[in-house]
Image (cartoon, rainbow, N blue to C red):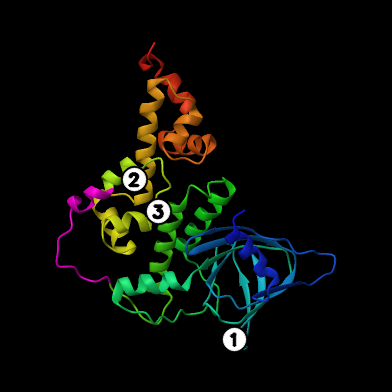
Amino acid sequence: MSDRQDAERDTLTQGRRNIYPLHSSSPLVMPKLTVWKGITIEHHLQPPAECEMCLPQHTICILLGECQTERRVNGGRLYQNHVRSGQILVYPATSDHWIRWQEQAEFLLLLLDPNLVTQVADELASRTTIELIESEQARDDLLIQQIALALKTEIEQGMITSSSLYADSLANTLTVHLLRHYTVWKPRLRETKSNPSASTLRHVIEYIHDHLDKPLTLAELSSIAEMSSSHFSHLFKRVLGVTPHHYVLAARIERAKGLLLRGNCTLAEVASTVGFFDQSHFTRAFKQLMGVTPHTFLQQNSKNLPE
């Protein structure tokens, strides 16, 4: 575990967040967590408890099962909610929250760095003062739910180290969504005088193909394009029809297919050469895009292999 993850785990006992079990026989469970730049995800499965939070990050809670809760925000009125699976609650950074649940609760916490939100807000509309709206009631938000579940999958499949670009993209998407739907102001994308085209991205594409063995990030690619991460992601998807993450993934798989057909590399060597964390990660990604495992792909193309 990295030093950053150790620091995040320690926050359960550092006063930022206090959880008290309602029954002495029900010990608390440390969450599974993963930290990327700008965004952290925690997966909790807790017994009946009450919790006090005042976190420096913007926090989104996504329930993974039905739960009856009592909540109080900044010392205000008491809210009693029956929260359905998949519904979300938004807690702005540094706000005080108290919450209690009387049954086992499974939930995800997305912790978003306020500096990232401020940066994206400034890119969208030159606005650096942001007031995130706290949740009085749980609500449905399919996009946030999908982002949280996608990051949860990264934890479960062990693709933490190699998924920086994916996490960057999801954090950016989540931030723009929060700014559009969960703040007291409505940003608009800045108008540009130029008409961007595929030529704008030519150097980025070349860089990607020259560095497929490296852990590429959204910040790195947008810097090459000389534009903000938000504008780069928007332009890339508009021009090429896929997100930067999916383009890089497809390029890695295409490069891997060529290496496999040469017949002089092991699966582990191919995985390393095209930038996957390990052979298992490579196999999952290959099957996701190609519909078959690398081994099956080799069997299907055995006549094309060199003697």
Element type at mark 2:
helix
Q: Is residue 137 visible?
A: yes
- Residue at x-position 43% and y-position 52%: 166
Amino acid type for the residue under numbered disc 3? Thr
Q: Are marks 3 and 2 in contact (CB under 8 Å)?
A: no
| Front-most of residues 69 and 187 | 187
Q: Residue furthest bottom?
A: 76
Amino acid type for the residue under numbered disc 1? Asn
Label 3 – label 2 distance at C-alpha: 13 Å
Q: Is residue 20 left or right of residue 7?
A: right
Question: Sequence-wise, which precedes: disc 1 or disc 3?
Answer: 1
Compared with 296, 77 (above or below) is: below
Check residue 44 for magenta coloring.
Answer: no
Compared with 139, 244 (above or below) is: above
Q: Which residue is mark 2?
A: 247
- Residue at x-position 40% and y-position 74%: 118
Amino acid type for the residue under numbered disc 2? Tyr
Chain part drawn in magenta: 189-204
Q: Residue furthest right?
A: 25
Query: Which dot, 2 or 1, sits closer to the camera?
Result: 2
Q: Which residue is mark 1?
A: 74
Q: Position of residue 190 (x, y in %)?
A: 24, 71
Q: Within 10 angstroms of label 2, few (less than 14), some, or many (20 or more) residues? A: some
Residue 222 sits in quarter? bottom left
Q: Which residue is mark 3?
A: 217
Q: Position of residue 216 (x, y in %)?
A: 39, 49
Q: Which mark is residue 212?
A: none
Q: Is residue 65 visible?
A: no
Element type at mark 1:
loop
Q: Within 10 angstroms of label 1, few (less than 14), some, or many (20 or more) residues? A: few
